[in-house]
């Protein structure tokens, strides 16, 4: 029998539940969708700094990189090179919309299997690429896998987990992203010296998490909500008993049935998102995704080796520095795993905004003063910059990284949940695409000022968390409207027609 951790008053204090081994196992397997995403984020920056890869696909970048007095900030400025990284995210936007339909029609579990299949085919094309077109098509298929996975996995975990533990379990998705980035950085460090096919090994190993997700998802249980939503009430009741670890699930079952019946009356969930009462959730979900990207984190994770080479650390040292930041990323995410359901979402977001702001300002100030167009920054200062980048990564890893995925997956009512989460995922992918596509050009034009650009956005996102974002810790997922939005000091006005008595602070 699977091990169980008893949860006093599981289900957020409303429904009896235990944190079962089955739920933990299902969450870990599903979270391998995050490992796929993270591995790709980490592998892209390392591969695009490898000479063998640049020689085969981006010869002009290779030549620019090795010119004696090439501008430090502009040596990697190439639109096609940026397209290699960013094309995945453009594909993910379209595919997350398709995945939102698949989640509703075929279930979360089957959608995760589709994600694994798309990603695996994309890996094969990338690893075997003979020309740039094959490379880009492979990236587009990887994007399909990321779009399907990022749509299905957070919803799956949010629906399968007892409310009391939903935050920590959902953060497993972000934890696997960080582990994927770390593994990719380690792989890049060792394959960089394997000439001339090291880059093929780096890209090809991305198949491993895809295989694990595809095979593992065969054995996990579908979410009770998805089963009931598709008319399988008996299977839904069984799944609910399995995932809660208790037989007394009648009240929660009836609530899910009521939510699915209400959702079934909504023929056009996307149109329903345009209603006044949907605005608070849509706004917060989209803004969280925009701010997550405008922290500047993907700049550091995509292009860490490139960035450190720009500072003059050398190829091996820059890849090793990327491994260091990746390791800190993983370690700090554990703070979110164990702290998000203890401290709450808002406290972590606000504290980390202050920490990331300080780090961005320090890094920007040092580079602005010491890293000119053609010089090499003094080694001691380069390592100070590396330390503050680690401070920045640390703050992001326990806040805006995991919570940017967690909060949108838990704030929508069932009738708009898939559609609403699609809006969140697609917003994330659009802004990831834009940042990935323009960063190297922005670095060339803005130089060190780019860090102050991201610092400005961190000030705005911290203010958003303080004034507009409600706390969702421990609230059952189907009771968010009544217990969160209708009682928020600002957002309650969007529910004036059926407002509850009394308005609480966020």
Image (cartoon, rainbow, N blue to C red):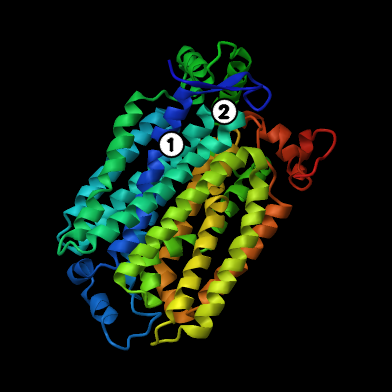
**Residue 453, x across and y down, in percent:** 56, 72
Q: Quadrant of the N terminus?
A: top left
Q: Position of residue 421 (x, y in %)?
A: 52, 42
Foreground residue, 2 or 298? Answer: 2
Q: Residue furthest right?
A: 502
Residue 316, which numbered label?
none
Q: Position of residue 479 (x, y in %)?
A: 66, 30
Q: Nearer the viewer, residue 92 or 26?
A: 26
Q: Is residue 187 visible?
A: yes
Residue 64 spot, x, y in % from top left: 28, 81
Q: Residue at x 46, y 83 (%)?
A: 371
Instruction: Tell me if residue 268 comes above or below residue 183 in the rendering.
Output: above
Q: Residue at x 20, y 56 (%)?
A: 200
Q: Neighbour class for label 2 at 10 Å: few (<14), some, many (≥20)?
A: some
**Disc 2 element:** helix
Q: Is 276 on the left or on the right of 202, as rendered?
A: right
Which is nearer the N-term, disc 2 or disc 1? 1
Q: Name the secondary structure under disc 1.
A: helix
Label drawn at residue 101: 1
Residue 434 visible? The answer is no
Q: Residue at x 34, y 75 (%)?
A: 76
Question: From the image, which quarter does the C terminus lie in?
Answer: top right
Q: Taking 286 as reference, is 428 left or right? A: left
For the point 34% across and 47% down, which residue is it? 144
Quadrant housing residue 103: top left
Q: Which residue is mark 2?
A: 263
Image height of 130 relative to 414, above or below: below
Above or below 52: residue 74? below
Nearest to the observer: residue 143 or residue 297: 297
Asked which quadrant contains residue 185, the reply is: bottom left
| Neighbours of disc 1 within 10 Å: few (<14), some (14-19), many (20+) | some
How far apart, in angstroms, are the residues tagged by discs 2 and 1?
14 Å
């Amino acid at each position: 029998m699977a091990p169980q951790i008893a949860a006093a008053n599981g289900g957020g204090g409303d429904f009896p539940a235990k944190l079962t081994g089955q739920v933990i196992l299902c969450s870990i397997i599903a979270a391998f969708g995050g490992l796929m995403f993270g591995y790709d984020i980490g592998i892209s920056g390392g591969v695009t700094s490898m000479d063998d890869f640049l020689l085969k696909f981006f010869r002009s970048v290779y030549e620019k990189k090795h010119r004696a007095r090439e501008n430090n900030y502009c040596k990697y400025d190439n639109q096609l090179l940026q397209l290699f990284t960013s094309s995945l995210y453009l594909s993910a936007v379209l595919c997350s919309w398709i995945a939102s339909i698949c989640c509703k029609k075929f279930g979360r579990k089957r959608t995760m299997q589709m994600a694994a299949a798309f990603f695996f085919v994309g890996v094969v094309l990338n690893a075997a690429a003979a020309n740039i077109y094959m490379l880009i098509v492979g990236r587009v298929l990887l994007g399909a896998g990321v779009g399907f996975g990022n749509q299905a996995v957070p919803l799956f975990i949010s629906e399968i987990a007892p409310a009391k533990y939903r935050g920590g379990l959902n953060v497993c998705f972000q934890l696997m992203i960080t582990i994927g980035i770390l593994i990719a950085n380690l792989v890049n460090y060792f394959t960089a010296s394997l000439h001339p096919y090291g880059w093929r090994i780096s890209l090809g190993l991305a198949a491993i998490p895809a295989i694990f997700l595809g095979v593992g998802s065969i054995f996990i249980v579908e979410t009770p909500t998805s089963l009931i939503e598709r008319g399988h009430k008996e299977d839904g009741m069984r799944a609910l008993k399995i995932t809660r670890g208790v037989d007394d699930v009648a009240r929660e079952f009836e609530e899910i049935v009521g939510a699915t019946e209400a959702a079934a009356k909504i023929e056009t969930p996307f149109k329903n998102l345009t209603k006044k009462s949907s605005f608070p959730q849509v706004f917060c979900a989209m803004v969280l995704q925009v701010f997550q990207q405008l922290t500047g984190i993907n700049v550091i994770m995509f292009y860490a080796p490139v960035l450190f080479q720009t500072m003059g650390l050398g190829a091996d040292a820059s890849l090793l520095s990327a491994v260091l930041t990746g390791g800190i990323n993983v370690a700090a995410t554990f703070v979110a795993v164990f702290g998000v359901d203890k401290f709450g979402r808002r406290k972590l977001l606000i504290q980390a905004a202050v920490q990331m702001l300080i780090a961005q300002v320090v890094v920007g100030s040092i580079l602005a003063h010491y890293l000119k167009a053609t010089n090499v920054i003094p080694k001691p200062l380069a390592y100070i910059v590396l330390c503050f980048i680690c401070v920045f990564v640390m703050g992001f890893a326990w806040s805006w990284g995991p919570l940017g995925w967690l909060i949108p997956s838990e704030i929508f009512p069932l009738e708009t949940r898939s559609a609403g989460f699609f809006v969140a995922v697609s917003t994330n992918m659009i802004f990831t695409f834009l940042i990935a596509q323009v960063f190297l050009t922005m670095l060339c034009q803005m130089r060190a000022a780019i860090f102050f650009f991201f610092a400005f956005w961190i000030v705005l996102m911290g203010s958003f968390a303080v004034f507009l974002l409600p706390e969702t810790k421990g609230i059952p997922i189907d009771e968010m409207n009544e217990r969160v939005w209708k009682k928020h000091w600002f957002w309650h006005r969007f529910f004036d027609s059926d407002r509850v008595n009394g308005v609480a602070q966020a």
